[in-house]
């Protein structure tokens, strides 16, 4: 399944939408964004996915 998804990304037919990239140290902020709290724009759910950078 991952191979198929990778091919779709390579062909430009599938494009992930990353709205925010946060460090692992900012995991509380990521959680607040998911909950629609004050860490974000304050207008509900974030646009795109929240990615956590580790390492």
Image (tube, helix red, strand yellow):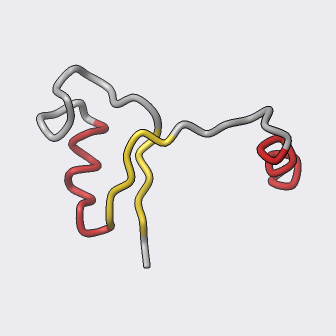
Look at 26% across and 39% down and name the residue there. Answer: 33
> Horizontal and vertical percent for residue 30?
28, 49
| Horizontal relation, residue 2 to residue 27: left or right | right
**Front-most of residues 20 and 1:** 20
**Front-most of residues 12 and 25:** 12
> Horizontal and vertical percent for residue 2?
80, 54
| Horizontal relation, residue 35 to residue 46: left or right | left
Quadrant assignment, res 41: top left
Residue reaching furthest top?
A: 43
Can you say whether 3 is above or below 44 in the image?
below
Look at 21% across and 51% down and name the residue there. Answer: 29
Look at 32% across and 65% down and name the residue there. Answer: 23
> Horizontal and vertical percent for residue 1?
85, 50
> Horizontal and vertical percent for residue 50?
41, 46
Residue reaching furthest bottom?
A: 55
**Front-most of residues 18 and 36:** 18
**Front-most of residues 17 and 24:** 17
Total count of labels: 0
Can you say whether 25 is above or below 29 in the image?
below
Q: Quadrant of the C terminus?
A: bottom left
């Amino acid at each position: 399944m991952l191979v198929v998804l990778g091919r779709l990304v390579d062909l430009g037919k599938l494009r992930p939408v990353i709205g925010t990239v946060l460090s692992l140290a900012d995991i509380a902020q990521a959680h607040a964004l998911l909950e629609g709290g004050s860490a974000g724009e304050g207008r509900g759910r974030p646009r795109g996915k929240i990615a956590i950078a580790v390492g």
